[in-house]
Amino acid sequence: MPPYVSAEIASWNERIAQAILSFGLATLGFCLLWSSAGTAISMFLIVVACCLAPRRFVQCWPRGEHMAQIGLLLLAWIALRTLLGEGTKNVHLRAVNHYHELLMLPVMWAVFRLAWRPQAFVNGLLLGALVSALVLFATNVHAWALIAGAPDLQATFEQAVTDRRISLGFSLSVCAFLLFEHTRLGRLPRVAGYGAAALLAATVLFAGDGRTGYVLLLVLLGCAGCRAAPRKWRYPAVVALLAAGMLVACMSTGVRSRTQETLSVLIQPASQRNTVLSTSIRIEMLRNAVDVAGSHWMLGSGWVGYADAFRAAALKRHPGKPDLLGAESTNPHSEYLLELGAGGLPALLLFLAWLGWPMWRGLRENSAEHPWAGAAGCVALAFATSALFNSVLLDFMEAHLYAALMAWLMARRMERS
């Protein structure tokens, strides 16, 4: 607990606020991976708790933290570009609201500095990840339908998993890395901690169906090897772990099928590609997004006008084919191309700085004395990798998880091991 707790432990207002805050943080962590409604309700409880202790919340605001400042500058640019450049209708306000996680990060940063029990968030997050892993495995072996005796329940869970396979791939990979870090630092028993991390990694490989999750798992596996190995053995350990990880991944049917589909689409000429395959659709969307970025790289097309610019680029490449798959999108499956195409060069540079700052801090801090700074850099690297393949700030689950988890990590980064 922070040192100020003993001075104000007798304050009933503070104690009630902290009880609500601890419950809100725990439920937020538990719901982040699978429930949008649960996430919203948890955030409401956290706001109520902060309103009960407004002076302390204001004192905890991260005024000198550069990552928070960069994020607020990016949000300000998005608002100015949208509201002044396009209009102030409801559709424009909703477009700005899609990026409210940039404000959520400093808010949660202050919340974790305010909270007596900030670990409640990560405890709930890791518990939610383990429950999600068990549900994924149960869905794959048809266990839910057998237990409940309901033939439609299996299809319901399969649809839920399909809708969130990208978010779950990112979330479970990051949670596996968090379990590894907690165990490496002695916060969890070795057998239970490493076993739980292996379970989440196995869930991504053998029960998930998202290519992004496969890539992130390898990225974080390399980060884990780099952080755990002695300095002189660091690079051999990373290479060995990546090789072992790829060998294990080859045992997964999902990895093999996704790899085969990707390679077959990339090898075939464009005229012979199966336009129904997700890889073909993504390639088409990326080409259109590159055209939009090339035409609007200075100030962008605007986030509301991006769909029209994207459609115009698609029709220019394929005249007379308005129904072509990948010809319409507000989500080009690359946050970098979206920032450049919709917000121009200022948005892209601010987004890169927002991602790069925790990585820079992680490299500068002594990993032995301040381990959480390095962990924050690794999570930022995972999010930056995911942004290559998805518009992650538009995704409710991924963006909320990253904002809340990064706030927790950065609030604890000065903690000594």
Image: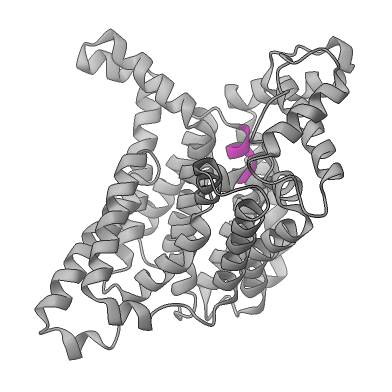
Query: For this view, does 18 lie left or right of residue 264?
Result: left
Instruction: Name which residue lies at 21% across and 72% down.
Output: 52
Q: Does the segment drawn in magenta span residue 316?
A: no
262 lies above or below 185: above
Query: For this view, does 1 lie left or right of residue 16?
Result: right
293 lies above or below 121: above
By secondary structure, the bulk of the magenta-drawn segment is best described as helix
Q: Which residues are magenta?
A: 211-216
358 lies above or below 165: below
Query: For this view, does 417 lie left or right of residue 113?
Result: right
Instruction: Name which residue lies at 17% across and 77% down.
Output: 14
Query: For this view, does 80 lie left or right of residue 289?
Result: left
198 lies above or below 318: below
Instruction: Name which residue lies at 43% across and 40% down.
Output: 199
Closer-to-camera residue (392/317): 317
Q: Tell which residue pokes out farthest to the bottom in this image.
A: 7
Instruction: Name which residue lies at 38% across and 38% down.
Output: 34
Q: Where is residue 318 drawn, in percent x and y?
A: 85, 18
